[in-house]
Amino acid sequence: MSTQPETRFSVIGINHNHIYGQVNLMLRAGAEFVSFYAPEPELVEPFSAAFPQARLARSADEILEDPTIHLVLTAGIPADRAPLGISVMRHGKDFMSDKPGFTTLDQLAEARRAQAETGRIYSICFSERLEIPAAVKAGELVKAGAIGKVVQTIGMGPHRIAPATRPDWFFIKERYGGIITDIASHQMDQFLFFTGSTQAEVVASQVANYKYPQYPELEDFGDALLSGNGGTGYVRVDWYTPDGLGIWGDGRLTILGTEGYIELRKYIDLAGREGGNHLFLVNQTETQYIDCSGMELPYGRQLIADIHHRTETSMPQAHVFLASELALKAEAQARRLGYLSHAG
């Protein structure tokens, strides 16, 4: 029986709680968590308690210069992720960022150059597809032709904001990148993946701050219309999840095909079945409900294979960059609505 090759990873930057999920997916795949670095004591203590096997490094350089480390993970402040990833690649290591992996098109261009020159992996953990069993199952169904040719995706990404729990950088656009750059990078990834698009453009986009004028750089609503060589897409994201909902957001994805459609209710089925990972399949012969909670999540083990075999089974590098490019371009060209039209 074959076994996974040894894979040692470290973490630099733990500013977003997504890092816990990133670490756990690599541990689940059999990788060894060696060390981490973060300059914020208030973040270090709970993280260290959750992962006592990893030692606290004295600096980021200590990790970058450790020749035994294969992979570096980050969920640092969004604006800091790309510079770190470029440094990681130039130190001969592979990289996994929380989304967004970039906050500017200049960062993306520099990362593309560094990746081409080094041949290292710059992966982004688009967890709303890679770490959601219903999305993994949808990928299998689409590949098997269950709904014919996919022609459109509609991705909804509502979130709960809880302003009192957010750090200062969350409200500074230069640091978080804007709502489409940030949240909607998930939906860009799903649009490309499910339509099979390898080329795409932003047809139109808009952002607003309708509810929080006290945070003038915050965007609380955004949407975008997309066109690709495999299909079209519509994306809507917001920070409006009401407190009455029993989860942080009613994330949904509809995948329209020529012979049917799939709807994912990823986190909650309103007034319906318990839990998450609900998939509804409608085609020419039936309407079917599939509980996807038991699906394997392959991203971690695929990334380990890519690290050791220099393959792209977890996610093509071009896909990572194109999904990011769509989000960044949609943000940059977005029509400004609401309070933002007065904030500049």
Image (tube, rainbow, N blue to C red):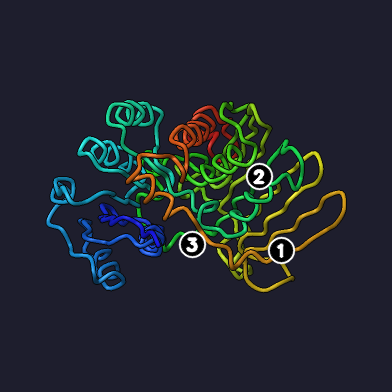
Determine which quarter of the picture holds residue 309: top left
Report the mark closest to the observer, 3 or 1. Answer: 1
Secondary structure under the numbered disc 3 in the rendered image: loop
Q: Which residue is mark 1?
A: 290
Mark 2 is on which residue type? Lys
Q: Which residue is mark 2?
A: 143
| In front of the other: 17 or 167 | 17
Q: Residue at x 61, y 63 (%)?
A: 267
Between the residue at mark 2 and the residue at mark 3, the CA separation in whole angstroms equals 38 Å
Between the residue at mark 3 and the residue at mark 1, the CA separation in whole angstroms equals 32 Å
Q: Residue at x 22, y 39 (%)?
A: 92
Measured along the vertical axis of the image, is residue 134 above or below residue 332?
below
Does the CB distance between marks 3 and 1 fall below 8 Å? no
Q: Earlier in the sequence, mark 2 or mark 3?
A: 2
Measured along the vertical axis of the image, is residue 276 above or below residue 96?
below
Numbered circle sitting on residue 162: 3
| In front of the other: 49 or 148 | 148
Q: Quadrant of the N terminus?
A: bottom left
Mark 3 is on which residue type? Ala
Secondary structure under the numbered disc 2 in the rendered image: helix
Between the residue at mark 1 and the residue at mark 2, the CA separation in whole angstroms equals 17 Å
